[in-house]
Amino acid sequence: MRGSIHHRPDRPAPWRARYRGPDGRGHSRSFDRKTDAERWLRAELAKLDRGQWVDPEQGHIEWAEYSQQVIAERLHLSARTIETDRLCHDRVAQWIGDVPLSRITHEQLRRLMASLTAAGYAAETVGRTMRWVKLTLNQAVRDRRIPSSPGDGLRLPRPRRAEMRTLTATQVDQLATALPVRYRSLAIVGAYTGLRWGELAGLQVTDVDTERHRLSVRLSLIEASGELPVLGSPKSAASERTITLPKIVIDEFERHLTTFPPSGQTVWTTEAGEFLRRGSFGRIWRKAVTQSVGAPCRIHDLRHTHAAWLIAAGEHPESIQTRLGHSSIQVTIDRYGHLMEGLDHQPATRLDAIAATVRNPGLGRDPPGISL
């Protein structure tokens, strides 16, 4: 056997197993019984053979310190995502922040999740926080600090998805009319394009081509607590898209830009020419909702309304995915699949019409290109 086991009767744990690792250093552990030393040595040598060996000292770093390192390496992500990572880090640090990576267990993570729930955090917040913990542990595995993640198999709470509200075209008009004149077009454009809030607030005049009826989503307004809002990349690569605009949106853009010519390039701003912030505009929005369609109605419901209109019109899910800027068609189906129920009746009706040309020849000829 590679490695060795030595008996040292003068020690409290007399059986010492030792081997040399890929790092060129010796690694050892002492045991009360020889059989335990042999079992440990066989397991360590097996890890060497499988290429799964991890230097035990690499796992001595505390979770909080390692989590901070992971956050510092995620500079390619948006400021809002990084802020969310930091909030998750802060929640967890008070529970397992000083625990070395190698000492974190599956049981500890279950207790952590229970503690967060008992502290009053919503299921969505608990799930988001535990996903951050799992992300750090998975990264620790890739960095060869721990052999496997204790977060594997951890069942996270399933958050209750917020109910979406869809408006009729009349209700969208009523809501737009209740908003200050400066922002009426924002509600119309939101409902008829499906843009996210950040995409609306960060929309630039140069992104709108009224002659070709095109709108390009290239930027999004990014807000992080304690920092000034800035323009950055949209949510994902799929979010960078170009969509065709209906005439009502073209008319709204032309009316708005004529009435409120921007001092810079941003389409909708405050009267002082500053970016529209989610919090301050939210107060304006909620007042208009109360005066028109009634609560609850979030700004994001304009996006849901757009999707619902397209589904009702029989648009293909792939077309809806493109307009909404979803990363995959599965995301679209997962979010709006319940609104698509019943649309399969149309193909079935068409197939019955095809069959009727055979069963009832007097009704008409066979469809072109079909041999029956």
Image (cartoon, helix red, strand yellow):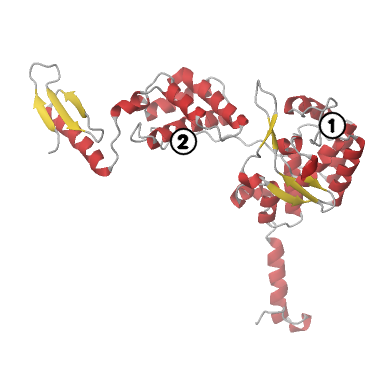
Closer to the observer: label 1 or label 2? Answer: 1
Is disc 1 surrounded by few (<14), some (14 to 19) or many (20+) residues within 10 Å?
Answer: few
x and y, in percent, of residue 164 in the image: 70, 39
Earlier residue among tags 1 and 2: 2
Q: Give the structural element (helix, strand or loop) at label 1.
A: loop
Q: Name which residue lies at 64% across and 48% down.
A: 332
How many numbered discs? 2
Q: Amino acid at mark 1?
A: Ser
**Quadrant in which the C terminus appears:** bottom right
Q: Give the structural element (helix, strand or loop) at label 2.
A: loop
User: Rounded to the nearest whole Å, what is the CA distance between mark 1 and mark 2?
Assistant: 51 Å
Q: Please state if 226 lies on the left or on the right of 292 as rendered.
A: left
Residue 349 is drawn in which quadrant? Answer: bottom right
**Quadrant in which the N terminus appears:** top left
Rendered position, 335 above or below 24: below
Rendered position, 164 above or below 103: below
Front one among 175 and 320: 320
Q: Which residue is mark 1?
A: 263
x and y, in percent, of residue 56 in the image: 29, 28
User: Is there any visible trace of residue 143 in the rendered image?
Assistant: yes
Q: Name which residue lies at 8% across and 16% down.
A: 10
x and y, in percent, of residue 256 in the image: 88, 38
Q: Amino acid at mark 2?
A: Arg
Front one among 111 and 227: 227
Q: Name which residue lies at 76% across and 39% down.
A: 203
Q: Please state if 111 lies on the left or on the right of 60 as rendered.
A: right
Residue 145 is drawn in which quadrant? Answer: top left
Picture disc at residue 155: 2
Picture disc at residue 156: none
User: Is there any visible trace of residue 36 in the rendered image?
Assistant: no
